[in-house]
Image (cartoon, rainbow, N blue to C red):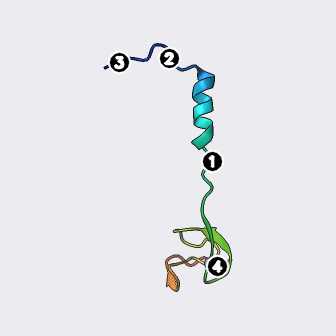
Amino acid sequence: MTIPKRRCSHSRTARRWAGYRKPAAPTMVICPNCQELMLAHRICPACGFYRAREVVKAEEE
Ligand SMILES: [Zn+2]
C-alpha cells in the first residue's frame, strides 16, 4: 500500500466537494386530491390523503 505524499488542504477538499455536494431539494408533487404542492411519498398536509383516496390522517381546519 502506498500512502499519499501530502495531505489535501482544506481548500482543495472543499473544491472537490463543491461539485457534488448540492442542497438536496425535497421532491414536490401536486396532490391528486386537493391539487396542492406536497412532499413526495408523504401524507398530504392539506387534506391528509396518501396514495390517492387513502385517508391516513384527516385534518380539517
Ligand atoms: Zn391533498
Placement of 60 over or under 7, stated as above or below = below
Q: Earlier in the sequence, mark 4 or mark 1?
A: 1
- Find residue 31 and report its image quarter: bottom right
In-front residue for pair 31/4: 4
Q: Amino acid at mark 1?
A: Pro
SS label for mark 2: loop
> Which quadrant would the C terminus be assigned to in this image?
bottom right
- The dot on residue 2 is 3
Placement of 10 over or under 27, stated as above or below = above
Across and down, in percent, residue 45 comes to 61, 71
How crowded is the residue under tag 2: few (<14 C-alpha within 10 Å), some, or many (20+)?
Answer: few
Cα separation, mark 1 vs mark 3, equals 35 Å
SS label for mark 3: loop
Q: Amino acid at mark 4?
A: Glu
**In this rendering, the label closer to the viewer, 4 or 3:** 3
Cα separation, mark 2 vs mark 4, equals 58 Å
Across and down, in percent, residue 26 comes to 60, 59
Q: Earlier in the sequence, mark 4 or mark 3?
A: 3
Name the residue beneath numbered marker 1: 23
- The dot on residue 4 is none
Cα separation, mark 3 vs mark 2, equals 13 Å
Name the residue beneath numbered marker 4: 60
**In this rendering, the label closer to the viewer, 2 or 1:** 2
